[in-house]
Amino acid sequence: MGFFSFFALTLIPVHYGLYLMFNKTGDGGWKALVPMYNYVLLSKRVGRPWYWSIGLLAPGLNLIVFFAYAVAFFRSFGIFDTQRLWKYCLLYPYYIPQVAKKEAYFGTANQPLRMPNTVRDWVESILFAVVVATIIKTYLAEPFRIPSASMEDELMTGDFLVVSKMSYGAQVPLTPLTFPFVHNSLPFTATTPSFLEWWKGPDWRLPGWTSPKSGDIIVFNFPVNDTMVVDPVLKAFSYYDQLYMIVGAELSQRSIDPSTIKDYEFTMLLNQARQAFLAEYKVMPMPIDKRENFVKRCVAGPGDRFEIRQGQIFIDGKPQVNPEMLAHHHKVYTKQALTEMVKTELRSFYFSNDDAMGFRSYTDANAAAFYLLNLNQKQVAYLKTLGSIDSVVQMVYAPEHNFQIWPNHPSVNNSVDQMSAFVIPAKGMSIDLTKENLILYERIIRAYEQKNLDVRGGAAFIDGQKVSKYTFEQNYYWAMGDNRHGSLDSRFWGPVPEDHIKGTPWIVVFSLDGDRPGNMFKQLRTDRLFYLPN
């Protein structure tokens, strides 16, 4: 469902209902079409403080405020019956205009159905609002803030967007006992869990009208966040990545080539790294629906033969069409040092501080000076028009035995720009459990398919039974950021399981540029109001 369908099904009926209401109250129906003022006026007519309308601007809080308004709206027309209120609030696009058209308006006094009770009305209104908003957030749509530059320039840091959970079908919560409107930690804490695992929901997804396709932007739970580091900074990063960094540092310190170590030596080094890390930090298991939220672009799906050559994605041997705003690191060679005037001009062309990396100067192997900039093709074309620019060369990172690059094994030689071909698992797809395949798929089988897999003497055992083949039980997807050299994505931790996918962005409601000084209104990116991601 696109934004305009969403707009037609929700916002238009609501504003039409306000139009009818304001005509009845003598305020003039046209005032229902004035943004923000319409809710200030509604506050007055339903007996709520005017500053509630400000809460509509805050993602997450706006859901509670909206449904609190809905409860107060229906009560101003004399509707207090609990069953009717539940039905009317859940189906608000239909009932708001119907009630405003057919029912008599009573306002905040002289309601015919019962004597007013201010405390009870407020408590019930907030309770109704929280419950209905939670249902909407869980099964229909959820607000989301873009925290990083990994999808720039399609999605910008500071974008506040609405994610559709209906498109792919909402996942039934695995941890229903949770504090409302927070993710995995309690308010004003960084690491205190916001959920209880006393009762777990079924692993089941509601039907959607489509499935993720190559090119879709998807929001999902971070797959390797199954073990969360109890630390306010490290909680958003992979626990396993911390171990790989420790192993890599140890080998570097001892001047050992990673490609020369054997499997048992790698396992031993990982165990030593785990012991050292756990001596300093605490970790805790994290259920799927409480893992950190990530947003990337789906670039390959189940059954695809995926490969990266020189930074270009190939599917089944064919190069794929790149997103319009795809960005890479580039070496920018100049005829002279960039002046402050040129730097200012570059920043005005949507070069963020991350794009320019502080405009630091580097020197290549031939002692030629260059600037390292993160650029899309539109920006590259612009730079080439400047007289001070000599050349712009896209960087391609060569393969290396880097444990932080998937499949995180010393025998595999990959990089963010070069990945050997492999097949992304599909539901019902069978593979031979060879040594080579186990390097690629062992974690998938063990962690995502939740099988008790053990490898002994080159043979695979599941639940103690020796097996030579395995058939996957769900689909998997490959996710990457459009900001290719500034994204933590599947290149570092592998395919995304289908049961981790939450939805797809509907619309960017508004966006704030944190690099701009001043208040929220000065930081507002007006060109991104109601922007439709693609």
Image (cartoon, rainbow, N blue to C red):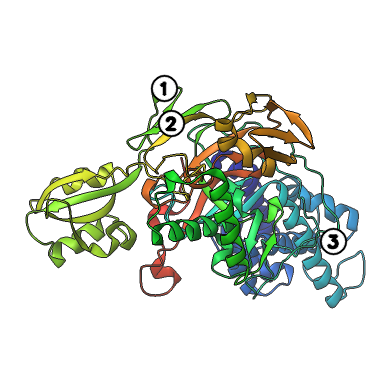
- In the image, 361: left or right of 512? left
Q: Amino acid at mark 1?
A: Gly
Task: Choose mark 3 or mark 2, whichever is in front.
Answer: 2
- Foreground residue, 16 or 333? 333
Q: For residue 317, which numbered disc appears in the image? A: 1
* Marker disc for residue 307: 2
Residues under numbered marks 2 and 1 in contact, where contact means CB atoms less than 8 Å apart: yes
Residue placed most toward the observer, 418 or 286: 418
Quadrant housing residue 437:
top right
Q: What's the CA distance linking mark 2 and mark 1?
A: 8 Å
- The reply to whether dot 3 and dot 2 touch (C-beta < 8 Å) is no
Tell me if mark 1 has few (under 14), some (14-19) or many (20+) residues whose alpha carbon lies within 10 angstroms of its own. few
Which mark is first along the chain, 3 or 1? 3
Relative vertical location of residue 130 with respect to residue 422 in this rendering, above or below: below
Answer with mark 3 or mark 2, whichever residue precedes in sequence.
3
Q: What residue is at 41 percent from the left and 47 percent from the top?
A: 154
Q: Position of residue 208 (x, y in %)?
A: 68, 34
Above or below — where is 356 with respect to 450? below
Q: Amino acid at mark 3?
A: Gly
Q: Is residue 434 left or right of residue 335?
A: right
